[in-house]
């Protein structure tokens, strides 16, 4: 019996220490679930099951997370993927070996963070992450993506990405990065992001959204983000001072997210040796007969669960194509059943999911941070149209005083044009400009405790020109 156990340990050690390319070729698994929060679901071969820690994932699997639910994966090549709340990730292709490599994922909705593994790093040209509106390729290792059916946003902590909207030259079916004339690159910058809105020809660089910034501030597993001990094995693509990811190790502390979700403490082992986990003996009590052994205490995490990603309940965009600028919204998307019309302007339209929420004076003064902006300047004589960008932005709503104040500094046609508007807000969340303002502004607040806000604006600037656009905001914490 002991001989068999020794043989088993030897075989297991040889498997774990085998070259990663061999593992990738001989194993159908793309990775392993190393931690969960909540009860994420796995869709496989027409069946749905609850994901558990230790489950192996393979090509064709689709992961679904609900509110306050996350999945943490280790890929076979020592990569790391975090699938955050309210997200859907499809594993289309993920393999390497002598027969060729392919790494293709689909983030259908929600938020994910990825630290790419060593096989992907060796063959970046075979990696593709599709979203509903754009294709993302690699220039580096650590990035975060948020997407819905309307827009995709990507920010980078380490390395870089390349993103391109789908078109006849960049299709969903293709593999690897799209690198055409409409692609744009972004390298490590937590302060900026690239955004692609459905129908938009070229990605736009903007200030990073609060959702992406918060995710990039989350700590990675210690063996990804921290320096390795001197005798620890190194992994290509994660830096000379970073160690490989141990699939049994996500943090220094033992963490329990729920009764089915445990993240084990670290196992300090030397390369080439499989060392069993040793449980410290219970303290020896005073000599008393038949004293029961107290089971180990499970430590509840002191850190809060990651916040759920806000699914927008406000829908807006430019409904018509102008000159070389394609439309950024369809009437059928903005004005569909279950949504109430907020604004129907010359260029921009807006709606909100129907809600009976009321916003009272107890909310006080609330500050917002802009997450999206889309704007244009139009010459009404020549019909020339140019896109605008927001260099400065602020929005404060004082629910106690039933008023709002917003500021934009818009860059258009080589000059800066300020937009400063004050007005009143109603208890249902609708706010409009005051009578003395030259601008026409109409907006809405949505979500519990005013989590979201948005408005569209129209401002004649003189010289037969008008500024028009839309904004989307998230409440500052």
Image: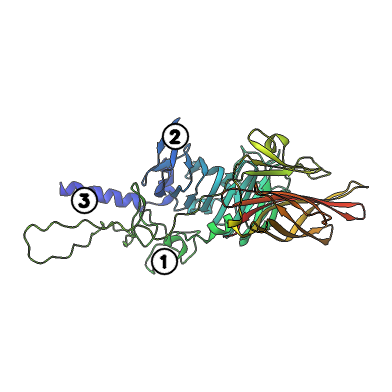
How packed mark 1 is, by other alpha carbons closer than 10 Å (few <14, some 14-19, many 20 or more), is: some
Label 1, on which residue?
A: 228
Which element type, helix, strand or loop, lies under badge 2? strand
Q: Secondary structure under badge 1?
A: loop
466 or 428: which is nearer to us? 428
Task: Say above or below: 419 vs 327.
Answer: below
Identify the residue at the far top of this view.
Answer: 46
Is 103 located above or below residue 155 in the figure?
above
The mark lying in front, picked from 2 and 3, is 2
- Residue for point 72% across, 59% down: 405
User: Within the image, what quadrant is residue 394 found in?
Assistant: bottom right
* Pointer 3 residue: 6
Please provide percent x and percent y for residue 376.
Answer: 80, 50
Q: For mark 2, what is the residue?
A: 44
Q: Earlier in the sequence, mark 3 or mark 1?
A: 3
Query: How many angstroms separate mark 1 from mark 2 (CA)?
Result: 37 Å
The picture places residue 413, in percent across and down from the top left corner, at 84, 57
């Amino acid at each position: 019996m002991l001989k068999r156990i020794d043989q088993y340990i030897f075989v297991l050690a040889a498997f774990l220490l085998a070259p990663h390319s061999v593992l990738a070729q001989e194993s159908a698994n793309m990775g392993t679930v190393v931690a969960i929060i909540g009860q994420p679901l796995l869709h496989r071969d027409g069946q749905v099951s609850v994901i558990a820690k230790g489950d192996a994932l393979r090509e064709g699997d689709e992961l679904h997370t609900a509110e306050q639910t996350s999945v943490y994966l280790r890929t076979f090549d020592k990569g790391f993927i975090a699938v955050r709340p309210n997200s859907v990730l499809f594993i289309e292709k993920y393999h390497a070996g002598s027969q060729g490599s392919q790494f293709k994922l689909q983030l259908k909705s929600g938020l994910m963070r990825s630290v790419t593994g060593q096989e992907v790093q060796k063959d970046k040209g075979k990696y593709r992450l599709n979203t509903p509106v754009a294709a993302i390729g690699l220039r580096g290792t650590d990035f975060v993506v948020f997407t819905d059916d309307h827009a995709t946003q990507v920010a980078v902590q380490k390395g870089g990405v390349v993103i391109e909207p789908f078109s006849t030259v960049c299709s969903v079916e293709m593999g690897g990065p799209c690198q055409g004339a409409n692609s744009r690159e972004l390298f490590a910058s937590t302060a900026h992001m690239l955004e692609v809105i459905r129908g938009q020809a070229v990605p736009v660089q903007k200030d990073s959204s609060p959702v992406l910034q918060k995710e990039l501030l989350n700590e990675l597993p210690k063996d990804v983000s921290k320096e390795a001990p001197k005798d620890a094995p190194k992994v290509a693509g994660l830096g000379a001072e970073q160690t490989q990811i141990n699939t049994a190790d996500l943090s220094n502390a033992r963490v329990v997210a729920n009764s089915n979700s445990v993240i084990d403490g670290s196992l300090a082992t030397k390369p080439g040796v499989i060392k069993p986990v040793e449980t410290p003996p219970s303290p020896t009590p005073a000599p008393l007969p038949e004293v029961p052994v107290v089971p180990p205490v499970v430590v509840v995490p002191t850190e809060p669960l990651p916040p759920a990603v806000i699914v927008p309940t406000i829908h807006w965009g430019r409904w018509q194509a102008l000159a070389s600028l394609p439309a950024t919204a369809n009437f059928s998307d903005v004005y569909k059943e279950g949504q109430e019309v907020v604004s129907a302007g010359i260029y921009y339209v807006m709606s909100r999911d129907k809600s009976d929420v009321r916003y009272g004076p107890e909310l006080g003064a609330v500050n917002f941070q802009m997450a999206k902006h889309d704007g244009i300047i139009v010459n009404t004589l020549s019909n020339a149209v140019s896109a605008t960008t927001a260099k400065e932005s602020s929005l404060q709503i004082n629910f106690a005083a039933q008023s709002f104040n917003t500021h934009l500094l818009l860059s258009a046609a080589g000059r800066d044009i300020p937009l400063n508007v004050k007005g009143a807000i109603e208890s249902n969340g609708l706010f409009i400009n005051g009578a003395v303002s030259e601008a026409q502004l109409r907006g809405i607040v949505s979500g519990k405790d005013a989590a979201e806000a948005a408005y569209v604006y129209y401002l004649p600037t003189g010289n037969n020109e008008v500024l028009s656009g839309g904004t989307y905001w998230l409440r500052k914490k």
